[in-house]
Amino acid sequence: MHDWRAIVATRLRPLGLDAETEADIQTELAAHLEDVFAAARRQGCSDQEAMARAFDRVPDWTDLTRSIATAKRKPVKILSVDAQTLWVPGMASLCGAVVVGLGSIWLAPPTLWLEPRAAWTLGPLLIGAYVGLGALGAAWSRHAGGSPARRCLAGVFPLTLHLAIVVQAIGAVGGTDIHAHPGAIGINLQLGMVLRFIVAPGMALAIGTLPFLKETSQPEGAGSPTPRFR
Amino acid sequence: MALLNDSTKRGSAELSILLVLEHQPLHGYEIARRIERESDGVLRFTLASLYPLLYRMEKRGWAKAAWETTESGVRRRCYSLTSAGLKQLSAARREWSTFFRAIERLGGLSRA
């Protein structure tokens, strides 16, 4: 009767895992070798031949140690799950919105902004860009393993910038022009700002996220391993 | 039967394990034994190819493992497929079918 647990324990190098996991792995491998040995004995092999057949299943103990340690090791995560699935994709989308905003100011001729129909020229371009930014945030979040809710939030993240600007602007308009402008005009102005700078870009961003809200059939990054057969 | 070369076997180990675990939970030795027997010895696992793969499948949520004690008192870690594992098996089946159909259309298998 061989002590397979001791045989494995002396040959398998430390895996760098917690003691309980290492003990479980040793028990599991020992049971496997014991089964190979027992099967060989049942087939009429001598004790020595059966041992050889069992050890034939482990041509290289160092390789076995390394393979198991690699498979068992938890991946080192520099960023938290929140950062990977929400903040980083959201900030990427937000940075894209800043680039689009500044780019449209720099690239469009100044006279275009004074043109009443400028909205018809720039509007579709900006809306299209925002659909793309929504898609960028959501796709990035999905790639990082984000839930549908997180993908959606990452996609519409640039709205935080819009909200900050619009709240400031509405505050400025409401605080300074209360006597200079009739109330109706002030409300229309504020409503217009909300529609143009919150609702329209928000819808564009949300539309961009839609294709990426469905669950994927398999976890991201789960490629096929390349096991070594004999 | 002649053994397949490494490149042909690449990636097939995962499918093999998913297939034998499809209908019932099995421990490591039994998984290796069934694959070897049902593939006429073409597919053979060493411990270094079997267990890291099982641990990865467990980590990905495709398989779950539970300790069981046999009547003789020996502890065995039995693996079974999760719903994610069954989905993965379905996807792998489709991929391999597509691959072999493509090879067949090239006339590569019928002349072997």
Image (spheres, rainbow, N blue to C red):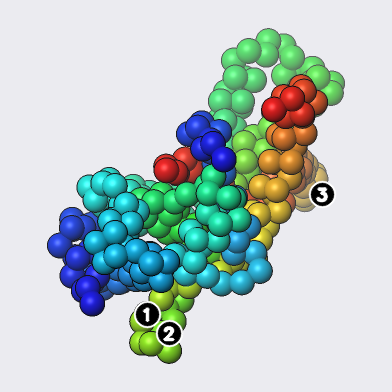
Residue found at x 63% / y 44%? A138
Pointer 1: residues within 10 angstroms few (<14), some, or many (20+)? Answer: some
Question: Residue A54 placed where, x, y %?
Answer: 32, 59
Q: Residue B70's mark?
A: 2
Quickly name the residue at label 1. B75
Question: Residue B101 placed where, x, y %?
Answer: 77, 33
Label 2 SS: loop
Question: Residue B65 placed where, x, y %?
Answer: 47, 71
Pointer 3: residues within 10 angstroms few (<14), some, or many (20+)? Answer: few
Q: What residue type is labelled 2?
A: Thr
Quadrant holding the C terminus of chain A:
top left
Q: Mark 1 lies on which chain?
A: B
- Above or below residue B105? Residue A210 is below
**Does mark 2 fall on the same chain as mark 3?**
no
Quickly name the residue at label 3. A184
**C-alpha span from label 1 to label 3:** 80 Å
Q: Is residue A149 visible?
A: no
Pointer 2: residues within 10 angstroms few (<14), some, or many (20+)? Answer: few
Pick whichever, B45 or A24, lies toward us: B45
